[in-house]
C-alpha cells in the first residue's frame, strides 16, 4: 500500500511544476483506482464526479494521460476501451479496466519480484524460480544471480 505522501511525491514528479493544479484531482482519481478490484471498469470522468463539470474535455484528456502515467508507476495498467472501437478526443466516453500491471510467474501466476542490483532477473517467491527480465516481460527460466557465498546481498 502506498502512503498519501509518497503518492503526492510521485504525482508531483509525473506532473512536474508546470501544472500543480492537477495534483489534487489526479490524487483523488488514483486513490479510487487503487481501491478498485482487478478487472473493475470505470472512467476518469466518473471518478472525478462533480469536479468533471469544472474542466474542459481537453483538460480531462490531459488528466487521463497523467493518471495513466502515475498508475503505470504503481504497476497498475489501465486497459482503455473506446465506444464503437473508435479513438476519440473526449475522455468523457473513454472507459478503462483496472489491470494488475505486475509481471506474473508463468507457473503459478503470482507476482514476480525484480531482483537488485542489475534488474535483469525476476523471482517467484512461491515457486522459488528465477526468470530473465526481457525488457519488462518474463523470459526463460534461469538461475539465481546471487552466486557468491562470501557476499551479503
Image (cartoon, rainbow, N blue to C red):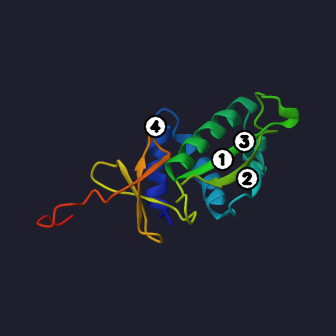
In the image, 96: left or right of 152?
A: right
Reading the image, the residue beneath label 1 is 78
Which of marks 2 and 3 precedes in the sequence?
A: 2
User: As displayed, is residue 13 above or below residue 2?
Assistant: above
SS for dot 4:
loop
Marks 3/2: CA–CA distance: 15 Å
Which of marks 4 and 1 precedes in the sequence?
A: 4
Reading the image, the residue beneath label 2 is 47
Which of marks 4 and 2 precedes in the sequence?
A: 4
**Along the viewing direction, whichever of 18 and 68 lies nearer the viewer:** 68
In the image, 145: left or right of 48?
A: left
Which of marks 2 and 1 precedes in the sequence?
A: 2
Q: Position of residue 120 (x, y in %)?
A: 35, 47
Pointer 4 local density, CA inside 10 Å: few below 14, some 14–19, many at least 20:
few
Marks 1/3: CA–CA distance: 6 Å
Marks 2/4: CA–CA distance: 22 Å
Tell us which disc is closer to us: 1 or 2.
Answer: 1
User: As displayed, is residue 12 above or below residue 124?
Assistant: above
Pointer 2 local density, CA inside 10 Å: few below 14, some 14–19, many at least 20:
some
SS for dot 1:
strand
Q: Which mark, residue 80? A: 3
Are discs 1 and 3 less than 8 Å apart at CB?
A: yes
Reading the image, the residue beneath label 4 is 16
Amino acid at each position: 500500500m502506498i502512503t498519501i505522501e509518497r503518492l503526492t511525491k510521485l504525482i508531483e514528479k509525473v506532473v512536474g511544476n508546470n501544472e500543480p493544479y492537477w495534483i489534487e484531482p489526479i490524487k483523488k482519481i488514483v486513490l479510487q483506482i487503487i481501491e478498485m478490484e482487478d478487472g473493475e471498469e470505470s472512467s476518469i470522468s466518473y471518478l472525478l464526479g462533480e469536479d468533471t463539470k469544472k474542466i474542459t474535455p481537453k483538460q480531462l484528456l490531459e488528466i487521463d494521460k497523467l493518471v495513466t502515467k502515475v498508475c503505470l508507476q504503481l504497476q497498475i495498467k489501465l486497459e482503455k476501451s473506446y465506444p464503437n472501437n473508435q479513438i476519440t478526443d473526449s475522455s468523457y466516453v473513454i472507459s478503462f479496466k483496472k489491470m494488475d500491471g505486475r509481471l506474473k510467474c508463468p507457473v503459478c501466476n503470482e507476482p514476480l519480484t525484480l531482483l537488485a542490483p542489475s534488474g535483469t532477473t525476476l523471482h517467484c517467491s512461491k515457486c522459488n524460480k528465477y526468470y530473465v527480465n526481457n525488457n519488462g516481460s518474463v523470459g526463460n527460466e534461469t538461475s539465481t544471480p546471487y552466486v557468491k557465498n562470501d557476499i551479503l546481498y
